[in-house]
Structure formats: C-alpha cells, structure tokens
Image (spheres, grey):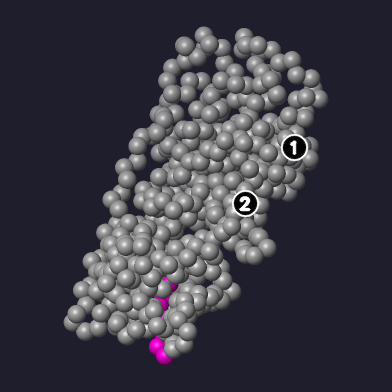
Amino acid sequence: MSLATVNSRALLGFEAPAVHVEVQLANGLPSFTLVGLADTEVKEARERVRAALQQSGFAFPHNKRVTVSLAPADLPKESGRFDLPIALGILAASGLLDPERLAAAEFAGELSLAGELRPVRGALALALAVRRAAAGSAAPPRQLVLPCPSARTAAQVPGLDVRGARNLADVVAALLPGDAAVPLPPARPWPPQLALPGPDLRDVKGQAGAKRALEIAAAGAHSLLLVGPPGTGKSMLAQRLPGLLPPLDDDEALAAAALQGLSSSAIDAAATGQRPFRSPHHTASAVALVGGGSPPRPGEISLAHGGLLFLDETPEFPRAALEALREPLETGRITISRAARQASFPARFQLVAAMNPCPCGWLGAGTAGQRACRCTPDAVARYQGRLSGPLLDRIDLQVEVLAARPADLLAAPAGEASAVVAARVAAARQRAVQRQGQPNGQLGPGDIDEHCVLQEAATHFLRQAADRLGWSGRRLHRAMKVARTIADLADAPQVGVSHVAEALQLQRVLAG
C-alpha cells in the first residue's frame, strides 16, 4: 500500500483555504474512488486524470484500488483545479516523484485529455492566501505551481515563488528525484495595462453645485445621489467621478483584481491601480448586485470593491435589490449564506445613484423652458418612495441637478479639468489619511468624535438643524463626516459653521 499527499487550495468566497489531496494505492478490486464533498466537476477529474496520465506517457495503476481524499472533508470543492494535484498524487504514490519537492509546493490546474494545463479561476486569490498563510508562520511561503496564464496573474503578488507549467509532463519533470529534475521557470507577471484617459469634467458645462458635490464625494469617499430631470448631466457627472479619485495602492489593486478573477473563468485582469467602475442595468436582480449562486460568486458590489458602483435610474431597480445594499454600505463586506455553505466577499464600494424626480421626469424643469411635469403629488411621492428611508439614510450626499436653458449651456465656458480637481481631491484625502488612516466616508461611529472636531458655534448650528429636520443618529454622523471633508478641502484643522452649512445644503433632496 502506498500513500501520498499533495498541497492545494479550494475557493470559498474570497478565501482560498488549504486542501490536502491524499492518494492511496492499495491492492484489491481495481477502482477509482474520490471522496471529500466534491462537486460533479471534481468527480469528473477521474476521467481527465486517467487520460492525461496516459497521453503524457505515464502508466495509470489499472490493477490498483485508487482512493483520493480531499481534506478537510466538510469543505466544499468545485471546478477542475484539483486535476493536477490528483495526477501528481497518483504518480507520487507510485514512487515516481521526490516527496520533499512535492511537499514544498502547492498545485492547482485543470487537465485536458492530452495532458495540457488549463487556467484556473481565482489565481490571485490563491496567491494572496499563500502569502497570508506564510505571514502567520516562521516558514517561507510554499512555491506555487499553476498553469502558465494563471501563474503570470499570481506572480503579481510580491514575495512569492510562482512557477508556470504548460502541461503535466513539465510539472512531473520538475519533481523527479535527484539530478533528473528540470526546474520550472519562474512566472513573469503580466505587463501593467495602460489606463486609457477617461471623460473629462470640463465637458460638463454649468452645474457648479453638482460638480462641487462630485469633488466632495471624491475627497471623502462619500456615497452620492443625483436627482434631476432627463438630460441635465447626471450620468455625465457620474462617469467623470473615477477621473477625480486617487489611484489604488498595491494591496487595494490586488484585492480588486482578485475579485474580478473570481467572477468568471477568465484570466484575472492585471492590477493597474485604476479604480473599478461598475454600472449594472436597472433590471439587475438582488443576486446580481450582492452576489450568490452555487458556489457563491461575487456580485456587482464586490466587483466594485475599491471603486464606484453607479446605479442609473435607481428607482427602476427591484426593491429587494436596493434594500440589499443597506448592510454593505455600512460594513464594506457582504456575507452570502446558503443552506450548504457560506461565503464572504469584500464590498467597500462608493455608491453613485442617479434618478429622475418623478415618473415623467420633468418635475422642476418647467422653469428652464422645458416641458412641465403633469404627475400628481401622490404619483411623485410613490415614485420617490421606491428609495426607502433607511437606504436614503445611508447616502451621504443628495444633490439636485437643475435643468439649464439651452442658451445658457451654449454660452457657458468650459469648467475646470479633471486633473485640476483631482489634485485638490488628492491633497484633501491625504490630510484625512494622515490624520485617521482612512477617508472620512469610512469613519466608524467611535472615530467621529475624535476626528470630526466641530467648533462650538458649528456644534450648536448642527444640533439645531438636526432637531428641526428630525435626523437619526446615522444621518447626523454622516453630515459630520461630510463637513469634515469640506474642511479638509479648505485645509481647515477644525470644522466651522461654513463647512457645516455647506454639508447641510447637500442633504435631504428627497424625503427620507
């Protein structure tokens, strides 16, 4: 009886827990048994591994009882990522591979019938998990062996020894005993993608108030709601917000790219430092927004992690989909619970929502020479009520985008370029990060009293306004964070009355 163990990893949400692929060759009735809570895709590895071994020139133990155990047994396993570890385990149990070289590495890869290696989903998540595991121990991180395209993606994680292989024979050659081994070459990361220039803020004429709100939202990572008639520039403004944001740091870029790689079987996009911008259609379901499925996959809020989630025509989204955004807006994380499993994904996104003020869209546009609204007050209230009070309470800025006369638009000069505004945003955000380690929009309740210090007159002014408007404690805290961002843009050490007054002007366009 022979036994071998190969190190690999599964995918469970954003995590990649360790899996030990144990292979036993024993005398008895010839069979191939695979256990360990494996999905159908994993169980089908029996046929892929058998054919790949034979086509690569290795003997399959037809006269043996082959038992493969994927431990831990209670961890769900899916996809073909365990093909390569199972094939290596069979060869190691047959005595063909060096046990020390095998134990010093982790393997993942899907095998074709000809023995070629195909890319696996979530290569960056695997590499990040290997680095985290090594950080908690004194031992260096294990070598990570993946198919070539996946290895180039995983090589973006610094401090790892990542090797890429084209086929099963290459991996076996690197694990042979003694001097017969032919090491795999180190994987080279994909070259950085050049970020294409996005739309410029100077294209938006007029709308000084909305552009100021855009600058505040970018400086403090605040959520934003734009309300106005059709054609006033709500979508134009939202599409120009990414150009105002500072680039992602290395860890944020790796996390964003890893989440992109979890969403499909495609190769993970190279980390470029460019913040994600997701704009789902208003027919998207709650599962499409927050994630789900079996196995659970990240939704739009996780794919927008570190970047922007733009919801155009927000009241047209299903009510359940909008209400599912409440907890992630607060916590920056989404946990998907199903009967058989649970998965957690990061979801620290910046929400930008746009909507018309009424069903016909023309409420408040008549003064600009456009058509007048004919909606009844009840119809307007029902339409605006599609955004619930608890959801509105979690949106930092609510801004009215006014309709402008065509003559005024033609005569309006070009505004500031995105690069000019982005420089002010970067300076304000740097002040916040130096003070508290994060943007103002991400401050927790315990941090507000320490970092959002108001002058005495500003405190009195804000208390009176909150009492008159009937604000909740959450809304009060959000107004304080917005005022702190306005003070950072002005390079003011404390929040004054003028900062609070401007923050109040950016609140409560809709009744919440």
Q: Position of residue 489 (x, y in %)?
A: 50, 40
* Distance Cα–Cα, label 1 vs label 2: 19 Å
Look at mark 2 in the image and give the residue it sits on: 328
Which percent across, then down, holds residue 227? 63, 28
Q: Which residue has dot 1 on it?
A: 512
Q: Nearer the viewer, residue 415 or 349?
A: 349
Label 1 element class? loop
Report the span colored magenta. Answer: 1-8
- The residue under the point 32% across, 56% down is 149
Most foreground residue, 335 or 511: 335
Q: Is residue 281 left or right of residue 429?
A: right
Kindly identify the amino acid type of the residue bearing the numbered disc 1: Gly
Quadrant containing the C terminus is top right
Report the residue that reaches farthest toward the right: 378
Looking at this view, is 29 or 144 the one in front? 29
Q: Which residue shows up at 47% across the image and 73% down it? A: 18
